[in-house]
Amino acid sequence: MSIPQLLLCLSLSMLCISSKPTEKKDRVHHDPQLSDKVHDDAQNFDYDHDAFLGADEAKTFDQLTPEESKERLGKIVSKIDEDKDGFVTVEELKDWIKFAQKRWIYEDVERQWKGHDLNEDGLISWEEYKNATYGYIL
């Protein structure tokens, strides 16, 4: 083995040893959080209330008396029990939570739309979007 070949092998070995390891990329799709509250089953029920009822409805429930809260939850459980067998299955509960979250998303989109549609014509022009998003600085 000649000196240039030896130097080349040594250089390649050093390059491999000192190179940066490949970054681990997270390729897993994560579902969005159901609530911005801390999830602790033993201590904090706010997360469950937000996920189960939706953020706005959970705020309403916080203001109710225990009797009113129980009555309203009974009505909601009747809506969740799709097959009307008197029991709520895991799938029915998942479907309800998805429904509650979608409803919140649609309501939020509607609220955002109204905030951007300044002339209330049902359309958002570039000027309206630009002014609502960036103000009058552009």
Image (cartoon, grey):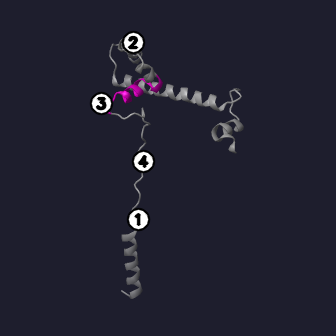
Q: How many marks?
A: 4
**Residue at the image position 41 percent from the left and 60 percent from the top:** 22
| Residue nearest the viewer, comparing 84 with 72 | 72
Query: Disc 1 designates what residue?
Result: 20
**Residue at the image position 41 percent from the left and 80 percent from the top:** 8
Residue type at the position of mark 1: Lys
Residue type at the position of mark 3: Gln
- First of labels 2, 1 by sequence position: 1
Q: Position of residue 17 (x, y in %)?
A: 36, 70
- First of labels 2, 3 by sequence position: 3
Query: Disc 4 designates what residue?
Result: 27
Looking at the image, is mark 3 or mark 4 nearer the viewer? 3
Q: Residues within 10 Å of mark 3 (few under 14, many from 20)?
A: few
Cα–Cα span, label 1 and label 3: 44 Å
Looking at the image, is mark 1 or mark 4 nearer the viewer? 1
Which contiguous range is marked in magenta?
40-56
- Looking at the image, residue 111 lies above or below residue 27: above
- First of labels 4, 2 by sequence position: 4
- Looking at the image, residue 5 lies above or below residue 118: below
| Residue nearest the viewer, comparing 28 with 44 | 44
**Residue at the image position 69 percent from the left and 35 percent from the top:** 128
Query: Disc 3 designates what residue?
Result: 43
Cα–Cα span, label 2 and label 1: 61 Å
Q: Are marks 1 and 4 in contact (CB under 8 Å)?
A: no
Residue type at the position of mark 4: Arg
Name the element at disc 3.
loop
Name the element at disc 1.
loop
Assess whether residue 44 is covered by the magenta stretch. Answer: yes
